[in-house]
Amino acid sequence: MYDAGKILIGLVIFLLLLTFPFWYSLGQASYESPELQLPEDSQECIRDTEWMRKNHMQLLDDWRDTVVREGKSVYTGSEGKQYDMSLQKTCMDCHTSKKKFCDRCHNSASVEPYCWDCHVAPEEVANGQQ
Amino acid sequence: MNALYALIMVLALVIIPLLGAGAAGWHALFGVVLPYLAFTVFVLGFLYRVVKWGRSPVPFKIPTTGGQQESLPWIRQNRIDSPSTKTGTVIRMILEVLLFRSLFRNTRVRLFKDETQLSYGSSKFLWLGALAFHVSFFVILARHMRFFTEPVPALFNWIETLDGIMQVGVPVLFATEIVILLALAYLFLRRVLVPQLRYISLPTDYFALFLLFAIVISGILMRYFVRADIVDIKTLTMGLIQLQPEVPESIGALFYTHLFLVCSLLVYFPWSKLMHLGGVFLSPTRNMPNDNRMRRHVNPWNYPVKLHTYEEWEDEYRDKMKEAGIPVEKE
């Protein structure tokens, strides 16, 4: 091979970059799906779990626009039950802890929603953590 | 027609996972076996191609000259576009790889005044489209690293934050998604609308574009429209990385379509023109200094020729030459 030294150095760098996730995860505990702390005193959410897992962000965004721009604040869930469109009064009434509920998945998937630029997390505030 | 062939190929690639993972439910095949296979083919194929190039001799010194070469001391040399030193060549390579300098010099020929006069004008659109596509693709690749690392290194978070800095909608709209779609659309349309380009475009030219289109569109669909649960997806991807594959049941056909298209890209990559990723570093027209008149370039495949000089020939036939009366150099 001509210029073997230079080409091999290039290939080694390329391979190191390409396999970065493999050697980055060496020596780390095997990945576990995040465990969420579910509320103890209520059994059902406004929609089913599967739907909420995929669409909660869209729902909250819609809620914000509906409340702030249209002044409507009543949401009818899939069971016909009515809820107040409020992250703090409805969602976080049951899911009180941001750290033990929201953050678990968000951190794992490296999502940083800007909800918390304005909203506060009830449990963390009560414990003086925020 | 060429575009149509490519389109049919890509549509077939879309249908395979829809049937296989969607209808037949072969999740382990599409989620584990094919990704490992595709990655292996990509790595080995890439190495094979680069080593093969490395083994090919460069018989001549053929740097492209984009400016005044080194000459007399009072003639100013263009040190980057016609470099004669190693440093100049390295700078030219960096500019080429990161900023596509040779595309920036792209010109366009036009006839005007009733096609009686010819003019060459600068044409930057191809450069702009190419750069927009490549940068977006790189940023998108970097953003995807959040699925393959745990904890996610801060660098990838910063890139993601920067990409979504406009905070449009939830999940946040990424600027690169719009840019890559526009860039791909431009790169496709110029092949279709410019007659000269359409004439030289082959199915493989369209295939790469359509495949990338399909990958981008399936990704966008998954993020904004037909949502996939990324926590389950991360369980799958981290299982692949840690060599403990695990296939969550809830992952839908759209994700497997996206993954299968990416696998197709990985498999296709080493055998196609997309190998310019490695090839750009090995182009003799770019990575050689323009020092033809200072240093002799010896063709590395010069065969050790067996010489039979005139002197030796004369030694052999001197007697016969003298007999025949032919003049000889040595008596």
Image (tube, rainbow, N blue to C red):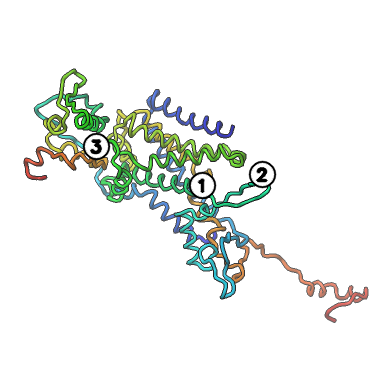
Tag nearer the camera, 2 or 1: 2
Q: Which residue is the site of mark 3?
A: A33
Label pair 3/2, CB-CB below 8 angstroms = no
Amino acid carrying label 3: it is Ser
Asked if residue B34 is positioned above or below residue B314 in the image, the reply reads: above
Residue A50 quadrant:
top left
Label 2: state its secondary structure.
loop
Using residue B241 as the reference point, say whether residue A85 is left or right of it: left
- Numbered circle sitting on residue A41: none
For the question of whether residue A98 can be seen, the reply is yes
- Numbered circle sitting on residue B114: 2
Identify the chain of the residue marked 3, using the numbered disc in the image: A
Q: Give the spatial CA distance, label 2 vs label 1.
A: 27 Å
Residue B191 quadrant:
top right
Amino acid carrying label 2: it is Asp
Amino acid carrying label 1: it is Leu
Tag nearer the camera, 3 or 2: 2
Q: Nearer the viewer, residue B210 or B163?
A: B163
Label 3: state its secondary structure.
loop
For the question of whether residue B266 can be seen, the reply is no
Identify the chain of the residue marked 2, using the numbered disc in the image: B
Most extreme residue toward the top is A80
Using residue B251 as the reference point, say whether residue B279 is left or right of it: right
Q: Which residue is the site of mark 1?
A: B126
